[in-house]
Amino acid sequence: MERTFNGYTRADGQIGIRNYVLVVSMVHCSNTVTQQIAWKTGAHAITHDFGCAEFTDKHARTRLALISAVMNPNVYAAVLVGLGCEQTDHESMMEEIKASGKSVSYVGIQESGGSKEAVIKGCRLAEEYLKEARRQKREPCPISRLVVGVQCGGSDWTTALSGNITIGAMTDLLVGEGGSVIISEVGGFPGSEHILADRAVNKKVGLQIIRMCDELREEYVRLHGQTIEEVNPTPGNKAGGITTLTEKSMGNVKKMGTSSKIQGLIYAGEHVPSAGLWMLDLRAPVVDGNATSGFGMAGAHMDIFSTGRGTPMGNAVMPVLKLTGNSRSYEEMKGLFDFNAGIVLEGVSVKEAGEKLLDMVIEIANGEETKSEINEDFEFIIPRENNR
Amino acid sequence: MRALQADAKDNVAVVVQDVAAGDEVTVTEILRVKVCEDIPVGHKIAITDLLPGDHVVKYGVPIGEASEEIKEGMYVHTHNVKDITEQLCKEYAEEFRRKAGEISGTDI
């Protein structure tokens, strides 16, 4: 029998696992007003340093990131907060958001008569949305509707050995049941392109993966005058037991499991076009939050984050399930981790650990809060890529 | 004491605690390896003998090449393994492109 979770049905047919309300700053000038509205109401703030005097290509990314965050299926409604004279065109954004059936409003600081007035107005709107959101009932949905991003950071020697392998087992199970998993962190791919291309659904996708890795390798040489092998594995990696780049890279790609084929590549702001395992080609700097926000922009419901040492990663539009492969880290930071994959090093089979992880994914989809939510780690950063 | 083999094809395993010369680690139900030298937690131990030039296999794939003779139970790391990532990836990419070209007739 197909497993289900209880989610929120959106007007456009998407399914959310949360009913978050966002307060989105249109420009750096409106950041503090945005933050105050969020603090006072419990809505999630998205702030950034952009939105005015940007070159057209850079501004396109700012707009894409902000609108994609609002379009994430976990978002019930949004309040856009601007100054009034910014570059970001809130009207066209609102048109796009409304077309999906989502509620959205705008608060301008200048037209409201100042900061305090804008905060009061914004709070009233956010509170109204939150009240409506609480009234919406969850409905049963098949787990084949779930879209999960997988990533790792704050790694230690257990990350590849138990953490990422457990995520891989979960990937095999979820995709096997018709669901979707997105991998990214493409900066970690060179060194295992031969493995990745072999996992592609067809030759075309395989060539796209090889080309992407070639381009990344060329970019490093062009910008830094060094090959990726010259700086990887890092001294810290070597101290932790990683000997070669292929070994490091393989540890990273273990999150995609062993049985599913890579259906294709998606780019910033695109949702997966069909179910299965997908690769998000996001060439932003290898900072954890870039991949997390990238998954949020891709419409993922949840992020599963493997961190041996422990980082507080969370996201404004998704619950982040944090997993460690290190039982000691888990015991020391129980308030930060959701799942202990260290059990794999103590004799539990990888398959069993993967099953337990999938059970937790379904519980979270049903509404169980992750530590990232309990700790109110609701960050969002705009992923910036060179020449995109 | 235990060492974890990530894939059945691997000729190295990862020790899950610090081990010292003379210890014995259990890799699988049927494989126990006598440790030849001290190895820190998270680092690799050879579970078969390797000759210079042999592939070091982890996760079921070659991750490097033995740069000297490595005996079962020895510590496997940068001192006795050559990183051949660039060569492996280049060879593979060329082969993949060639095959894909043969099938589709075009490079995308």
Image (tube, rainbow, N blue to C red):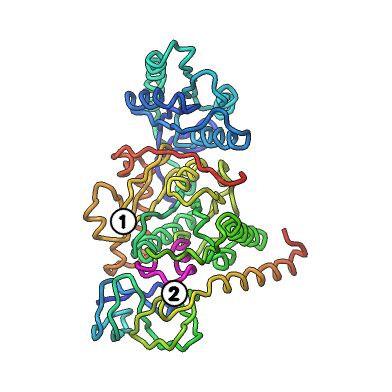
Q: Report if residue A326 is visible in the image.
A: yes
Q: What segment carries the magenta color?
A: A238-254
Q: Secondary structure at mark 1?
A: loop
Outermost residue toward the front in this view: A225
- Main secondary-structure element of the magenta-colored stretch: helix
Give the amino acid type for the residue marked by disc 1 in the picture. Answer: Arg
Image x and y of residue A116, in percent = 37, 15
Q: Is residue A318 magenta?
A: no
Q: Residue at x 26, y 57 (%)?
A: A329
Give the amino acid type for the residue marked by disc 2 in the picture. Answer: Lys
Toward which corner of the image does residue B42 lie, by quadrant?
bottom left
Q: Secondary structure at mark 2?
A: strand
Q: Nearer the viewer, residue A145 or A303?
A: A303
Disc 1 residue crowd, few under 14, some 14–19, many 20+, Cα 10 Å: some
Q: Using residue A299 as the reference point, say whether residue A161 is left or right of it.
A: left
Q: Using residue B22 as the reference point, say whether residue A162 is left or right of it.
A: right
Q: Nearer the viewer, residue A313 or A287?
A: A287
Residue placed under numbered mark 1 in the picture: A309
The tag on residue A325 is: none
Outermost residue toward the top in this view: A113
What chain does badge 1 belong to? A
Image x and y of residue A332, in percent = 22, 54
The tag on residue B58 is: 2
Give the answer, above or below, for where A45 lies relative to B71.
above
